[in-house]
Image (cartoon, coloured by chain):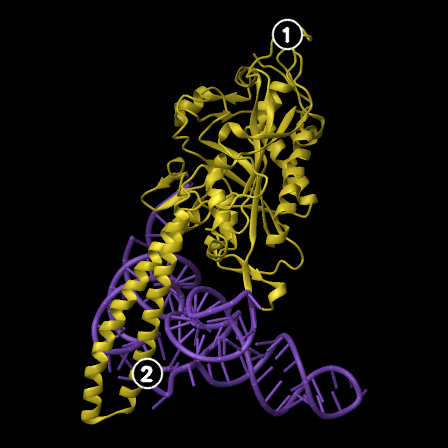
Chain colours: A yellow, B purple
Amino acid sequence: MIDLRVLRADPDIVRASQRARGEDESLVDQVLAADELRRSALAAFEQARAEQRASGKAVARASGPAKAELVVRAKDLSERVKSLQADADAAGAQLDALLRGLGNIIEPGVPAGGEDDYVVLDTVGAPRDFAAQGFTPRDHLELGERLGAVDTERGAKVSGSRFYFLTGPGARLELGLLNLAMARLIERGFTPMVTPTLVRPHVMAGAGYLDAHASEVYHLQADDLYLTGTSEVALAGYHADEILDLSAGPLRYAGWSTCYRREAGSHGKDTRGIIRVHQFQKIEMFFFTSPQDAAAEHQRLLDLQRELLDAIEVPYRVIDTAAGDLGGSAARKYDCEAWVPTQGRYRELTSTSNCTTYQARRLQVRERDPERGEQTRHVATLNGTAATTRWLVAILENHQQPDGSVTVPAALRPYVGLDVLEPVR
RNA sequence: GGAGGCGUCGCAUAGUGGCCUAGUGCGCCCGCCUGCUAAGCGGGUUGAGGGCUUGAACCCUCUCGCGGGUUCAAAUCCCGCCGCCUCCGCCA
């Protein structure tokens, strides 16, 4: 949710943001009108309520016939209060519904437009020239099967399409990668967290995943719980309804969880291998910070992601996602995409979003504002991928050898316990 | 799954329909007093929204786990939900 005060004070900023996202500008005026309505309804209710409270005291003091008469009058007043309260509640609900329909206000500099209007900020490393090395690269699934590392056939037998087993060296590679990421983050002062993957509706909604992404999310009807597609959801909810002390700096969490995604809108896309699957593992970074530090912390998250990508030695590029391709909660989003040789293109391995105060406002995460004494204000939240199962795709393909073996990147070897993955068939 | 108990200010507790503008103790903050510390004395100490301005002060409303209901009036009575505790049952 955006700040209603900002919208009142400067509606043009919100209009411009909506325009850049390719979303409805007129929503801004609808919100302003609903706000007017709510304020007048609220004032009417509160005045009537104050009268009622005064009359209640009079009743309590009176006795005998005088009391009976006062009660009769108080009944009328009670009816009026009830009806005015209903009006005020309805006006409040209307405003809230409209306000939740607005996406976060984009950060200045975000490219306007949709999915294809990203701006490439940096490109690191060069795609390997397999032709010059005299062989045609195998894709990650063929490699994984030859190495005895990935089994999608049995994954489908047990759970259906887009499920898989990581076996032997594949499982070791994933655990090694996640442990490397976690170890690096702990060194940087992160608090490691293993988070719940089933959450209540208000937590899912608070993180913003029940709006546009609702069809992407698994729901357990019998228990009314949602399976999370990232530990961001649980980490965002971790401090819900709390007033945090950020005077010693941001709270930095590294959440390890299995992630579940329905992939409802992507039938036919990436059906081969483990690029797009219903279940995978991820280490997610999540910050709670003071609003004025959010943009700088966002750069820090991006730097950490780049360091981790450097550690697995794959070519990648960094893109600044266009406004129309941001989630509703994000004010800015950077993706790092690794080169996938057999696809001849870059594929997303990490994503980091600055949600400014948008998530925190829904989840009621606040801090004391040092400049305004004891007053509270909403904090900013940021999130970013540290490592996921999908990274195995880039590792396998970019480090493959002509004989079908795969060299384990040096930084990973202590965590995987193997220097080379050898074909078993 | 069954039975019972509980949820009040940062913590602990009092409060069985109007005298609650929620009392008291502890903690914390400010001040006074005092060789220092402690003690003592006085004051303050949930959060949100609205009036309203750049802000402060002031006024009003809401906030006793959450949401409904009864009543002229609800921390207090009723219903639902959530959480915690105890016992029984079940259990990868």
The correct choice, above or below, for A357 with respect to A109 in the image is: below
Which secondary structure lies at badge 2?
Answer: helix
Residue type pointed to by label 1: Phe
Do the residues marked 2 and 1 share a common chain? yes
Query: Which mark is nearer the camera, 2 or 1?
Result: 2
Q: Of residues A39 and A104, which is closer to you in this image?
A: A39
Q: Residue at x 64, y 51 (%)?
A: A293
Residue A200 seen by the camera: no
Which secondary structure lies at badge 1?
Answer: loop
Q: Which residue is drawn at 34% across and 74% down?
A: A47
Q: Earlier in the sequence, mark 2 or mark 1?
A: 2
Residue type pointed to by label 2: Ala
The correct choice, above or below, for A388 with respect to A14 in the image is: above
Residue under label 2? A54
Residue A313: x %, y % from top left: 68, 25
Residue A220: x %, y % from top left: 35, 42
Q: In which quarter of the view is residue A210 placed? A: top left
Chain designation of label 1 = A
The reply to whether callout 2 and callout 1 are in contact (CB within 8 Å) is: no
Residue A391 seen by the camera: yes
Residue under label 1? A135
Residue A299: x %, y % from top left: 65, 41
Query: Is B4 on the left-hand or right-hand side of A254?
Result: left
Residue A329: x %, y % from top left: 49, 44
Circle 1 crowding by C-alpha within 10 Å: few under 14, some 14–19, many from 20:
few
Q: Which mark is residue A91?
A: none
